[in-house]
Image (tube, grey):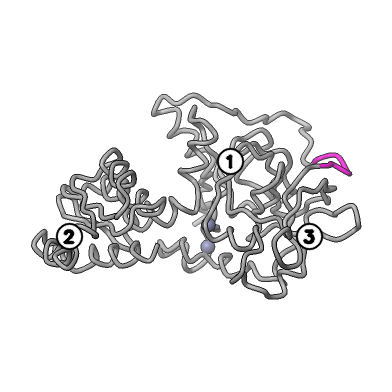
């Protein structure tokens, strides 16, 4: 038998799906012959660079981009998403994790949206000119976890420590600068790897897209919709405890998953109102319900609906945020 394995291009599939759904190609690929694959040397860009300890550790700096190689990608940032877990590090607040990373000059930020400006010679997923989401988590598509449907645990996720980061730029004082989690969203340019990048073909604004692709959506919406984590059966009842950015994403995830009753629980009225707008069918104020809350949820059959207690698991996971 001389059968060649069929190669499937994720980029082509996404583009086809977008075309089928009538979406316009907001940023068509510049697939021109002889296209320049990398930026000119000494490309300057601005970034919020964090270094040292204490408040004021993050300053706006003009950096010089280093040449890229392999599967690296340079993305011109249109929008970035903010994340609670960046707050203490960026602002240098008490409780900040003080490890070897604090001695390095690092661009924080957990992802964003932008246009590909340069690609390394091994990049296959995107082309220069493509609009992309830089995700908060990688998906290589080849490792054990990715192949068994657990891209949330992709092998690359564990390779973000101080010894895994590569310098992407230089400060004026010559210090090498690194991108946190191989992303570094708080900058005019994100230098990442293709495992973190998903081409998008849509007319949605960069800000809207930035939120959909953010780590908030990955955690909230993903938790509620991922079959591997906590599938919510169509017609079931889901309860979301805490309706901050994560919880509101989970409310939308529960709606997408087809839950017929979605109970959103939060002491803040504006959050409860928002929850109703994005898919909650019921809202509860824990300060009003007090000890009765657990009984109300038990009566709504939250934890027992479906084939096991996975819906309850969502409640548990979200409540931590
Ligand atoms: Zn984050
Ligand atoms: Zn993987």
Residue receiving disc 3: 167
* Residue 199 falls left or right of residue 47: left
Q: Could you say whether the residue bearing mark 3 is in a helix, strand or loop?
A: strand
Q: Say which of 195 and 185 sits in front.
A: 185
Q: Position of residue 252 (x, y in %)?
A: 32, 46
Indicate which disc, 2 or 3, sits on the residue closer to the N terminus: 3
Indicate which disc, 1 or 2, sits on the residue closer to the N terminus: 1
Viewer-side label of 1, 2: 2
Measured in 3D between alpha carbons, the distance from the residue under mark 2 to the one under mark 3, in whole angstroms, is 52 Å
* x 49%, y 57%: residue: 1
Magenta stretch encompasses residue 43? yes
* x 77%, y 61%: residue: 105
| Magenta stretch: helix, strand or loop mostly | loop
Please say if 56 is above or below 257. below
Tell me the quarter of the picture where residue 130 sits: top right
Q: Could you say whether the residue bearing mark 2 is in a helix, strand or loop?
A: helix
Please say if 52 is above or below 273. below
Residue receiving disc 1: 113
Q: In the rendered structure, which segment of residues is drawn in magenta?
A: 39-44
Tell me the quarter of the picture where residue 34 sits: top right
Q: Is disc 2 surrounded by few (<14), some (14 to 19) or many (20+) residues within 10 Å? A: few
Q: Is disc 3 surrounded by few (<14), some (14 to 19) or many (20+) residues within 10 Å? A: many
Measured in 3D between alpha carbons, the distance from the residue under mark 1 to the one under mark 2, in whole angstroms, is 41 Å
Q: Say which of 184 and 69 sits in front.
A: 184
Extreme residue toward the right, this view: 173
Residue receiving disc 2: 289
Q: Position of residue 173 (x, y in %)?
A: 91, 57
Q: Is mark 3 within 8 Å of ligand 1?
A: no
């Amino acid at each position: 038998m001389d059968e060649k394995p069929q190669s499937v291009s994720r980029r082509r599939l996404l583009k086809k799906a977008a075309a089928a759904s009538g979406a316009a190609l907001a940023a068509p690929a510049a697939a021109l012959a002889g296209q320049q694959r990398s930026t000119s040397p000494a490309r300057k860009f601005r970034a919020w660079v964090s270094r040292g300890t204490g408040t004021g550790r993050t300053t706006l700096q003009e950096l010089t981009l280093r040449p890229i190689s392999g599967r690296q990608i340079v993305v011109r940032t249109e929008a970035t998403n903010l994340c609670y877990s960046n707050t203490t590090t960026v602002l240098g607040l008490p409780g900040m994790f003080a490890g070897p990373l604090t001695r390095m000059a690092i661009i924080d930020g957990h992802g964003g949206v932008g246009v590909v400006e340069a690609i390394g010679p091994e990049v296959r997923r995107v082309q220069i000119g493509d609009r992309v989401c830089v995700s908060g988590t990688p998906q290589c598509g080849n490792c054990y976890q990715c192949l068994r449907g657990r891209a949330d645990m992709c092998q690359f996720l564990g390779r973000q420590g101080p010894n895994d980061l590569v310098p992407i730029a230089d400060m004026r004082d010559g210090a090498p600068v690194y991108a946190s989690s191989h992303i570094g969203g708080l900058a005019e340019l994100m230098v990442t790897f293709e495992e973190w990048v998903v081409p998008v073909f849509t007319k949605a604004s960069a800000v809207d897209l930035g939120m959909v692709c953010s780590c908030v959506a990955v955690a909230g919406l993903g938790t509620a919709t991922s079959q591997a984590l906590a599938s919510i059966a169509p017609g079931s009842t889901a309860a979301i405890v805490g309706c901050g950015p994560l919880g509101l994403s989970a409310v939308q995830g529960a709606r997408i998953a087809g839950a017929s009753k979605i109970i959103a629980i939060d002491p803040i009225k504006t959050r409860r109102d928002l929850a109703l707008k994005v898919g909650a069918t019921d809202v509860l104020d824990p300060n009003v319900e007090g000890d009765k809350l657990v009984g109300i949820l038990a009566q709504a059959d939250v934890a027992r609906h479906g084939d096991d207690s996975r819906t309850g698991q969502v409640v548990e996971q979200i409540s931590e945020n």
